[in-house]
Image (spheres, rainbow, N blue to C red):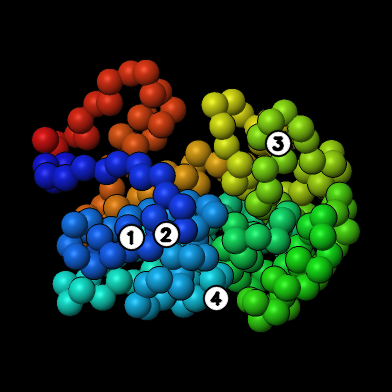
Amino acid sequence: MGIQGSYRAIRVDVAGMSQVVEDIRAGELDGVNVTMPYKGVAAALVDDLTSDARRARSVNTIVRHPDGTLVGHSTDVTALRRLWPAEVSGPALVLGAGGAAAAACLAAGERGLYVSARRPEAVTHLRHQLEMDLVRVPWGSAVVGATVINATPVGRAGDALEARIVELADAVIDLAYGDEETTTIGAARKLGLAAVDGLEVLVAQAADSFRLWTGREAPVGVMVNALRNPSRETPTAPNQS
């Protein structure tokens, strides 16, 4: 897109995360994405938070404003809102109770909200954290007509969710991703359900981060191609150098 810059991965511990934030303050970096397990740490290190990031207590994108203020965003939430299947209107069933699950709950908004996790106390903690009216359902239980958001690693390594969870759903969003299609997405597509896989969510998160840093719309098609075909040379976006 004609932007002079680079994007690179930095492996850190907690002390390293603090140093990265100081590097942003010093102008050595313009911004960063943050992955687990440091999204909560990032939320505590920035100067200000968007409302979504504050409620989720999770930051995956840090932006340095011209006045030097560091603002933490959660593009986990904004990406899920945009990708939510428009053709379904039923409740949401969120699987998991961690940071990704918090983002999914916020994206679900005013829909009927059910949360299932292996540790019931984690759901209680999530309810208090988000101050949302969510209903806990036992792990492995289904909710008829729900949009199921899998915010756990289940399905990534060939294991599978309880079959009824997908069979009784109207749509599935799977945040887990890998080189192969997850069992959850595979089952949803066989049933003809609306399905959003983890790679789609990853690109949507990245596109929102790109927009926050540059003020320009991201070349999503180029990004998707690079992600799904990593061995091929990434083409230049149309009409761009």
Answer with left or right where residue 211 lies relative to residue 113.
Answer: left
Q: Residue at x 84, y 41 (%)?
A: 162
Name the foreground residue: 130 vs 15.
Answer: 15
Label 2 sits on what residue type?
Ala
Indicate whether 7 appears above or below 139: above
Label 3 sits on what residue type?
Gly
Name the residue tied to disc 2: 15
Label 1 sits on what residue type?
Gln
Place of residue 142 in the rendered image (x, y in percent of width and height, measured from the top left): 85, 52
The answer to whether residue 82 is seen in the rendering is: no
Indicate whether 238 appears above or below 7: above
Quote the CA–CA distance across marks 4 and 3.
28 Å
Quote the CA–CA distance across marks 1 and 3.
35 Å
| Label 3: how many Cα within 10 Å (few below 14, some 14–19, many 20+) | many
Q: Which numbered circle lies on residue 155?
A: 3
Q: What element carries label 4?
A: helix
**For discs 4 and 1, the disc positioned in front in the rendered view:** 1
**Residues at discs 4 and 1 in contact (Cβ within 8 Å):** no
Q: What element carries label 3?
A: loop
The answer to whether residue 160 is seen in the rendering is: yes
Q: Which numbered circle lies on residue 19?
A: 1
| Label 1: how many Cα within 10 Å (few below 14, some 14–19, many 20+) | few
Q: Which numbered circle lies on residue 55?
A: 4
Answer with left or right where residue 108 lies relative to residue 62.
Answer: right
